[in-house]
Amino acid sequence: MRRLRLFTAMPITLALVLAACGGEQASPSADAGSEPPEGSDGAAPSDGGGTATGGTVRIGWAGYPDSLNPGNGVLSEAYTIYELVYDTPLAVNAAGEYVPELATEWTVDEGEDVTTYTLTIRDDATFHDGDDLTAEDVAFTMQLYKDTEDFPFLPSYVTPFDTIEATDETTVTLTTAAPIANFEASMAFIYVLPMHIWESVEDAVEFGNDEMIGSGPFMLSEASQGEFVQLAAYADHWGAPPNVDEVIFQSYEADDARVTALTTGQIDAMLDVPETAIPSLQNEENITVHIADVAAGGSLTDIFFNIVEDENCPPEDGVCSGHPALRDVAVRQALAHATDKEQLVTIATSGTGSPGLSLVPPGLGEFYASEVEDYAFDIDAANALLDEAGYEDSDGDGVRECLPDQDCETLTFRLNYPSDATTGAAESEVVQATWEQIGVVVNIQVLDPDALTAVCCPGFDFDVMMWGWGSDPDPAFLLGVALCSEIPSGFSETGYCNPAYDELYDAQAIETDRAARVEMIHEMQQILMDDVPYIIPYYYPSIGAWRTDTFTGWIEDDPTLGLEDPGNLTTIRPAE
């Protein structure tokens, strides 16, 4: 799985790729890890009226959550589980609109010196252990995320708030010195924790959260590292409790094993459908393949460079072993010209994807800067850039040498990608072949996602990396990855630092005039295109598949949504 926060126009649940993401029970494939718990017998018999309930839904995916602690999650599989186990103050509907979840309403009062945001919290929500969920839990959670700077992502959603207070059991009051542009987007990712459990935790980062008590529609039953996660329906959920009894996410290392498990009925649905398997699955009886609209989604693959400067190397965690030549923007621009995006789209997505441009995907509408001019695939232009910058191949061996003032010998780069990237090998070989044409050697190394995260950030112990992102419905999250201030936090993965970019980011964060904010965000995308800390090879759709003879009701009538929509697991029922 790629590391992702994946946006699909709805709250990110079933599989925040989401990340990767039955019927008659069969033995798991040999490489599926250990066998899931016994006693999960697949779908319950239908009662004939399309109202049957019960059963176990089995979903195959390629990865496994990197943490059960919402504060520590990086991989998309983790966020899939968070969305099912926890509630958030607000959610996002299929139209991209923010709607109530734990907060039944919210107001904004823009005073002369302070802006006050008020959330009214519903009074009928309970945690999985039976305790009531109140405004105090919501305020506690926000303050915990704000205070725990070592959490990689979640602090960014609450950093702007100067004060966070539960004024009574159903009211949370937040204040800022100035209005913030994306308040609702921030509230959609606050996974509310039970204060009565977390207030006694001495170290929130080290806390394993093995019981994972939340208030969402599913609760954790069992998890086996790298193998499966089993969730049970929470019958007392304040909303519509699931129609099924439980869901098991089963990890499969091999794509073929996952596809076979679906066709033989070992699983009921799968995410991370390999593009090469689409035709055969479409020809299978009782299987539906759903390909979401790539233009409406928020998933991207990226190639990024380790360009952290020595003075910005994180003092405690930073290795900062990146190749010195990659700090030269001319080298990065040449590599961008030498990247064949069309070929990568074909190989990686079988034509279902589209060439990438910026960190803001087209699914974010007017925030996507379509006017920004990309680097055309042009080997001659790439070679000309390196020639002009002084990178010679003096011995004629086909590999350019570093400049005299750089602490390196040749343009030979390490290229890492995650082991659960289904087309990672083919994609990296394409990059290797085209970059070779401009005198650059690429040494490819595949790492499992946890290891890749460790060498990435804030370790900066790599040269070039291929991975991916899923976007929030607001662009601020992904654009924040390029801030100078995020280099030591582990959120920045490139070490890129441009004060002009940071200034624009700070300005858009408080710009409430939407047109003015859009203009700033477009300008930020242009800066990133000019400086090239990233190459975005392609955007890709969510592709899922499910059996129609075990469960019914999967969302398929909205082309913008994939299986990752959380509504799936709360609305599906056993098939007739």
Image (tube, grey):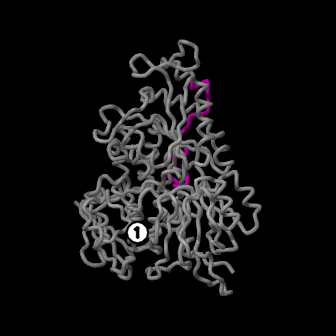
Quickly name the residue at label 1.
88
Q: Is residue 371 magenta?
A: yes
Locate residue 40, reporting x and y percent: 57, 74
Residue 297 appears in which quarter of the rendering? Answer: bottom right
Q: Amino acid at mark 1?
A: Thr
- In depth, the one of 30 and 297 nearer the eye is 30
For label 1, the crowd category at 10 Å Cα-Cα, with few meaning under 14, some 14 to 19 and many 20 or more, is many
Residue at 66 percent across and 43 percent down: it is 347
The reply, left or right, for residue 98 in relation to residue 121 is right
Does dot 1 land on a helix, a strand or a loop? loop
Give left or right: position of 128 versus 139.
right
Seen in the picture, residue 576 relative to 413 is either above or below; the reply is: below
Q: Position of residue 103 (x, y in %)?
A: 38, 74
Foreground residue, 390 or 323? 323
Quadrant of image for the C terminus: bottom right
| Observer able to see residue 211 | yes
Residue at (31, 36) in percent of width and height:
312
Number of labels in the image equals: 1
Residue 166 occupies which quadrant of the picture?
bottom left
What's drawn in magenta, residue-wise?
A: 362-382
The answer to which image quadrant residue 35 occupies is bottom right
Tell me the residue at 61%/75% (across/down).
42
Q: Is residue 473 visible?
A: no
Q: Report the residue at 62% width, 81% height from top.
A: 44
Q: Is residue 11 on the magenta stretch?
A: no
Image position, residue 343 (x, y; %): 66, 39
Is residue 267 depicted above or below 120 in this figure? above
Foreground residue, 240 or 48?
48
- The residue most toward the left is 113
In this rendered view, identify the residue nearer to me: 43 or 403: 43
